[in-house]
Amino acid sequence: MEEERATEFSSYATTSLEESREAIAAHYYDMRLEVAGRPTEFETRLSVVELGALTVGDIRFGTEMRMTFAEPGVYHVAVPFGGRFSVQEGHGSVEFATERRALVFDPARDIRIDKWSADCLALTVKIDKAAVLRQLELLLGRSLRHPPRFEPYMDVSRGPGLSWMRLATWNLLERDVPLGLLSNPMIRGRLEQTLLEGMLLATDHTFRAELETPPPPMRPASVKRVMDAVQELPAEPYDANRLAAIAQVGLRTLQEAFRRNVGMSPMAYVQEVRLQRVHRQLRAAAPGTTTVTDVAHTWGFVHLGRFARRYRERFGESPSQTLRAE
């Protein structure tokens, strides 16, 4: 197997079925691959870029294929640039992806990909379900009890679906740009957020109608000043009085404004932002390069016991489980 790596990119080329499985499992899923066409024409070519909560790649096999896999906790978007394939979730109906419509599915149920044509080259995007939920909560300005359920198709022939597909593809094109914008963590973070928001705006799902309702009145300037400051420097040693000074209002006034407009106290908002930064860094960390303690301290958590408890409550797993997840 030929493999090339840059800081955020990985590329593979192999004629071995087992090496193909290993490459795909390293970034996507432990997948059962079956050659349905001519074995002599089988050659996997896979390019991948990691964007925090998203894994963006393109793949071709050179011959007809069948695949099965399952993994909870993620969504998947796939669209062929050429050729076609079908996807079946569990015992549901068989849906076909074409160059004009991507398929959006939830691998929590067994996924079967069939009818993969020999000429098929597909954009394939794995998206963390918890990250989608958090982004949706930020857009709606409230907490949600359940993640969204998506309709099976995204129209990528026009409008926001086409824009989303082109933005995802742009990340792959950056592989050939040494020291390009994608090498900047700030830019990667913004692209990650834009793709998460774009998915919610380009697809039909259970919260789409609510997203399209007119936004609520703008938050008071005092609240925005605090939120902007915390987003920019979340690890700072904030306390309630310092936040009130940033807001330029009294403490009780700020607490009431946050309760009415954000749904939590100012200090709870600080903790939420910090937890999200920790979660993102733990997910992106390569094995053996950091520890939970180092990451927690980086983002301002001093009391590790309290931090671990809050983290588990927020993400449903311990920080060490997130660090080992990849």
Image (cartoon, rainbow, N blue to C red):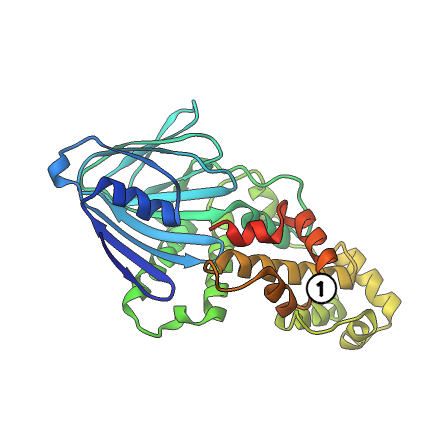
Quadrant hosting residue 89: top left
**Residue at x-position 65% and y-position 63%:** 274
Q: Position of residue 198 (x, y in %)?
A: 48, 53
Q: Which residue does the image show at 52% across and 41% down from the upper left?
A: 73
Depth order, front residue of 233/282: 282
Circle 1 residue: 270
Residue at the left extreme, as displayed:
40
The percent position of residue 64, horizontal first and vertical second, equals: 20, 35
- Figure check: 151 above or below 162: above
The reply to whether residue 250 is in sight is yes
Q: Secondary structure at mark 1?
A: helix
Asked if residue 150 is positioned above or below residue 187 in the image, the reply reads: above
How crowded pointer 1 is (Cα within 10 Å; few <14, some 14-19, many 20+) is rated as many
Is 109 placed above or below 324 here? Answer: above
Residue at 31% x, 73% y: name it.
178
- Judge by depth and name the residue closer to the eye, 321 or 275: 321
The three-letter amino acid code for the residue at tag 1 is Val
Q: Position of residue 44 (x, y in %)?
A: 22, 46
Can the viewer see residue 135? no
